[in-house]
């Protein structure tokens, strides 16, 4: 049973988890104090044009200016410039970027990628607005299409539905996966909402000077409902009344069918602990993840890529070393795909698989990885396992990763992960002291060191310090500080011309300076600097249109027509004069109309049983009636077939019941070797089987 769990009991964190039973398969978190800018729309000013990068830098109100590539600048922002022919006169020269856009020009931009490290946000002027079923691109008429996850005949039906939509000129439209199976009326309803939203955004951009926030993306709860809520979600649990009312109002307007699935969680046990996923979330913060067989995967982040190493450790799941390596790699592949979703990691990845000698096993691991990532919403590209046992892949960065949202670089190691030992730091400081002492006009050097490093220099290297003082005529003072930790230190160089008040050594020890922690500074800054968006997301004017009776009847008619034609191979017509009912349709079948073949465990055991089966295969469907009932009001929708008697191939074929060589008695008998007889049996069995299976669903 799949559930969506929404934890909003703590205002500092909003968490949404998708679970299958008690297993977490997707997770999202939002910290209100840390603004997420992806998909936000701003009005900015171009502050710099860099021809070498073919890009512009835009001030949209953040501390770091955003990066706007030339290919992401819409044509209506570019100045008309006459193309200049090249020197050979063959190929026209493309105008320079600085000739097409100018500094100080105002542009409407949307955040494509969040700020990361020392990199500013990636921007685009091709705005996209995500709705329930559609994505509207107001200034990109060339873009559009249908989600790559929608395939088959449904894709063709959606393509026809898109032609019937009233799409304004110079706009593009994409049908999301949630739009699968929706009719024109439902798609037009969502399109009208997106058009109203864009009109409000466009109107607000003309009323205020740049830079400012025009439109802010919805919070994590609305995004989760919009992006993850599908028919396979059986229950939505929310542990906060305010969030419950928000979800209820959203579903009432957008997806009213899901109103019966939401429930306010009131138990004393916390929601995430109830379903045993709190510990699974904690694993997503760890560097090492254990596997059930005893192996493990280790995830390390670098500036260029993320490396994933697979270790067999105590894994013994296999008869030999090759089998153990293969089984561990398969198990690790599933966990890697899951961890990428939970942590929302993006960029380049290199997976170091355990060496496998069999090429067949390598291909199986690659195929297993492709199957494991199919449920991922992000775009993923995978390579093949190289001769070094490495597999390269890339994953689209959907939003800030779990680490970027909730973790800070270690203040001691500065995010490096390791620190130098005491001896290494102390000797490094000693060399720096000697180097500074050799400079001109240096009178004294004061070194503030951690207690361990100061003790090492004063006890182990006292003679070296004395020699430096005597040789260079410079005073050296080593001061231990309990407020410093390895590898931190501070060196003061006092020159002869500088004024320096003489103090005792203990009086020169610096006291701890109490500063606001980095995360607290960030929270305070955001609280003061964040301004409300000019346009906020609003609810639809009217609820989502429901499937009406005529449309439901047409869908049922189409379904039974294809089913009957495929099963019987004859032209069976379905009349149009039947009544559709509201509700969930259940297919039932009258036993008197479509007789089932009489079978037993030892069918065809004697001649009488074979004759009974052949008589049952002669099915007359003229006037047959298949009833479709609604479980709510038990109304009946008759669908009557008008056709002649359906003759089977076995009836036309000569009977060979007397040939006992074609049949074997007993439980291990084989089917008759006569291909015509076999075909007739399978055809009728398939027709009856399909009809009967629909009766059980």
Image: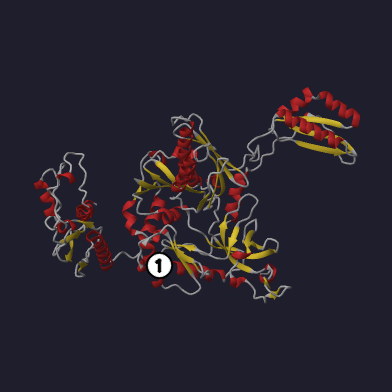
Colour convention of the picture: secondary structure
- Image vertical order of residue 331 relative to residue 421, above or below: below
Question: Which type of secondary structure does the marked residue at label 1 adopt?
Answer: helix
Q: Position of residue 487 (x, y in %)?
A: 70, 34
* Residue nearest the viewer, comparing 434 with 101: 101
Viewer-nearest residue: 611 or 460: 611
Question: What percent of the width, then of the height, locates residue 459?
Answer: 77, 22
Residue 99 in picture, x, y percent from top left: 69, 71
Q: How many numbered marks are there?
A: 1
Identify which residue is drawn at 70% across, 61% down. 52
Q: Please indicate whether residue 202 sits to the left or right of residue 22 in the image.
A: right
Q: Is residue 226 visible?
A: yes
Q: Is residue 614 left or right of residue 329?
A: left
Classify the position of the N terminus by image quarter: top left
Kindly indicate the quadrant of the structure image that contains residue 253: bottom left
The image quarter in which residue 125 lies: bottom right
Q: Name the side, left or right, on which 478 lies relative to 204.
A: right
Residue 103 seen in render: no
Figure check: 9 above or below 324? below
Label 1 crowd bin: few (<14), some (14–19), many (20+), radius 10 Å = some
Q: Is residue 508 left or right of residue 594?
A: right
Where residue 373 sits in the image (x, y, percent)?
A: 46, 48
Viewer-side residue, 227 vs 326:
326
State which quadrant residue 106 falls in.
bottom right
Q: Furthest-left residue in view?
A: 608
Q: Which residue is labeled 1 in the image? A: 159
């Amino acid at each position: 049973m799949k559930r969506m769990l929404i934890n909003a009991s703590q205002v500092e964190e909003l968490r949404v988890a998708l679970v299958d039973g008690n297993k977490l398969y997707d997770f999202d978190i939002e910290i209100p104090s840390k603004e997420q800018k992806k998909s936000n729309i701003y009005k900015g000013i171009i502050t710099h044009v860099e021809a070498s990068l073919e890009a512009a830098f835009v001030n949209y109100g953040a501390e770091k200016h955003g990066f706007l590539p030339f290919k992401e600048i819409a044509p209506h922002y570019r100045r008309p410039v006459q193309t200049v022919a090249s020197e050979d006169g063959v190929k026209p020269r493309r105008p320079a970027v600085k000739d097409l856009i100018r500094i100080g020009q105002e542009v409407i931009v949307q955040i494509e990628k969040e700020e990361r490290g020392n990199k500013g946000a990636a921007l685009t002027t091709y705005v996209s607005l995500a709705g329930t079923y559609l994505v509207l691109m107001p200034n990109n008429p060339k873009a559009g299409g249908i989600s790559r996850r929608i395939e088959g005949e449904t894709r063709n039906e959606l393509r026809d539905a898109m032609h019937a939509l009233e799409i304004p000129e110079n706009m593009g439209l994409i049908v999301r996966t949630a739009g699968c199976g929706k009719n024109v009326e439902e798609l037009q309803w969502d399109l009208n909402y997106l058009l109203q939203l864009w009109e409000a955004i466009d109107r607000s951009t003309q009323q205020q000077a740049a830079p400012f926030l025009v439109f802010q993306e919805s919070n994590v709860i609305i995004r989760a409902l919009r992006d993850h809520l599908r028919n396979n979600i059986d229950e939505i649990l929310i542990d906060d009344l305010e969030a419950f009312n928000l979800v209820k109002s959203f579903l009432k307007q957008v997806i009213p069918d899901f109103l019966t699935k939401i429930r306010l969680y009131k138990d004393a046990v916390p929601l995430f602990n109830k379903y045993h996923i709190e510990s699974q979330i904690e694993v997503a913060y760890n560097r090492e993840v254990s596997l059930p067989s005893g192996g493990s995967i280790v995830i390390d982040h670098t500036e260029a890529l993320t490396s994933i190493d697979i270790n067999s450790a105590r894994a013994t799941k296999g008869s030999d070393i090759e089998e153990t390596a293969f089984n561990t790699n398969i198990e690790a592949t599933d966990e890697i795909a899951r961890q990428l979703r939970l942590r929302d990691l993006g960029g380049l990845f290199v997976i170091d698989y355990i060496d496998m000698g069999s090429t067949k096993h390598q291909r199986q691991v690659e195929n297993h990885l492709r199957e494991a990532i199919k449920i991922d919403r992000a775009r993923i590209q995978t390579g093949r396992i190289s001769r070094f046992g490495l597999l390269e892949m890339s994953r689209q960065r959907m939003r800030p990763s779990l680490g970027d949202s909730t973790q800070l670089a270690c203040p001691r190691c500065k995010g490096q992960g390791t620190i130098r030992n005491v001896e290494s730091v102390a000797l490094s400081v000693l060399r720096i002291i000697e180097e500074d002492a050799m400079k001109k006009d240096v009178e004294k050097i004061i070194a503030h060191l951690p207690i361990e490093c100061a003790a090492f220099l004063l006890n182990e290297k006292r003679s070296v310090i004395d020699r430096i003082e005597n040789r260079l005529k410079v005073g050296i003072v080593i001061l231990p500080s309990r407020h410093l930790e390895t590898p931190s230190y501070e060196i003061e160089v006092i020159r002869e011309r500088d004024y320096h008040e003489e103090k005792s050594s203990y009086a020169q020890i610096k006291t701890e300076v109490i500063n606001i922690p980095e995360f607290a500074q960030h929270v305070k800054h955001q609280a003061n600097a964040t301004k409300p968006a000019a346009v906020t997301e609003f609810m639809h004017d009217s609820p989502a249109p429901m499937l009406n009776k005529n449309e439901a009847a047409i869908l049922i008619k189409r379904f039974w027509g294809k089913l009957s034609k495929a099963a019987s191979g004859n032209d069976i017509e379905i009349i149009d004069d039947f009544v559709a009912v509201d509700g969930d349709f259940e297919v039932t079948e009258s036993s008197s109309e479509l007789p089932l073949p009489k079978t037993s465990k030892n069918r065809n055991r004697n001649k009488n049983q074979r004759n009974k089966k052949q008589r049952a295969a002669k099915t007359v469907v003229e006037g047959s009636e298949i009833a479709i009932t609604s479980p709510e009001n038990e109304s009946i929708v008759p669908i009557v077939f008008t056709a002649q008697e359906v003759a089977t191939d076995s009836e036309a074929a000569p009977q060979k019941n007397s040939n006992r060589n074609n049949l074997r008695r007993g439980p291990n008998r084989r089917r008759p070797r006569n291909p015509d007889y076999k075909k007739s049996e399978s055809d009728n069995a398939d027709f009856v089987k399909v009809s009967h299976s629909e009766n059980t669903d």
